[in-house]
Image (tube, rainbow, N blue to C red):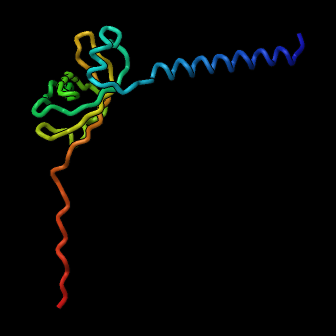
């Protein structure tokens, strides 16, 4: 075989392997935003798939058990209120604004367990702050 043909085959094998590894990595880390109703429709097909779910955090639902943080996500659509129990056990600390009795929205990444509990490894929270800037009094000179 010609040296150029051998070199070309080696390059093709290397590029093919890198492409295969990249495609596998993308599929493994991909997560898609789902609504709670969509999770219910997935049924057993949704179990152990990496997913992202968002919703409102139900008031007074945040509890802690050791390292785990339990709470309930709620979504209301077409007059139907759906709930999803979530257990967060990630390595990142909880956002400062993620507190009980605060109206929050949360976005969680993780997997739906066969027990229909969402096991989150990442948590993002958007909560209304009770701290607002004070109005500045006008300066009078006289």
Q: Tell me: residue 103, above or below residue 54.
A: below
Give the side of residue 60 with respect to residue 15, left or right.
left
Q: What x and y, as percent, mark residue 125?
A: 26, 38
- Name the residue at the front extreme: 78
Q: What x and y, as percent, mark residue 72?
A: 18, 26
Q: Quadrant of the C terminus?
A: bottom left
Residue in front for this viewpoint, 12 or 73: 73
Residue at figure coordinates x 17%, y 54% from the top left? 131
Q: Quadrant of the N terminus?
A: top right
Give the side of residue 7 with respect to residue 30, left or right.
right
Residue 50 visible in the current orientation: yes
Q: What x and y, as percent, mark residue 76?
A: 20, 29
Residue at figure coordinates x 26%, y 34% from the top left? 106
Residue at figure coordinates x 19%, y 49% from the top left? 129
Q: What x and y, as percent, mark residue 112?
A: 29, 16
- Residue 134, quarter of the rendered image: bottom left
Q: Tag count in the figure? A: 0
Give the side of residue 23 with respect to residue 110, left or right.
right
- Name the residue at the right extreme: 2
Q: Tell me: residue 6, above or below residue 33.
A: above
Residue in front for this viewpoint, 77 or 138: 77
- Residue 10, quarter of the rendered image: top right
Residue 121 visible in the current orientation: no
- Residue 64, quarter of the rendered image: top left
Residue at figure coordinates x 26%, y 41% from the top left? 126
- Name the residue at the bottom extreme: 142
């Amino acid at each position: 075989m010609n040296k150029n043909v051998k070199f070309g085959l080696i390059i093709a094998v290397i590029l093919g392997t890198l492409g295969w590894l990249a495609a596998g990595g993308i599929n493994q880390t991909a997560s898609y935003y789902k609504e709670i109703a969509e999770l219910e429709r997935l049924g057993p097909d949704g179990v152990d798939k990496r997913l992202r779910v968002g919703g409102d955090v139900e008031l007074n639902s945040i509890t802690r058990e050791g390292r785990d943080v339990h709470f309930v996500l709620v979504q209301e659509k077409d007059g139907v209120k759906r709930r999803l129990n979530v257990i967060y056990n990630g390595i990142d600390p909880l956002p400062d604004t993620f507190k009980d009795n605060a109206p929050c929205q949360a976005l969680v990444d993780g997997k739906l367990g066969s027990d229909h509990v969402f096991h989150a490894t990442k948590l993002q929270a958007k909560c209304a702050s009770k701290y607002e800037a004070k109005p500045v009094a006008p300066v009078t000179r006289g």
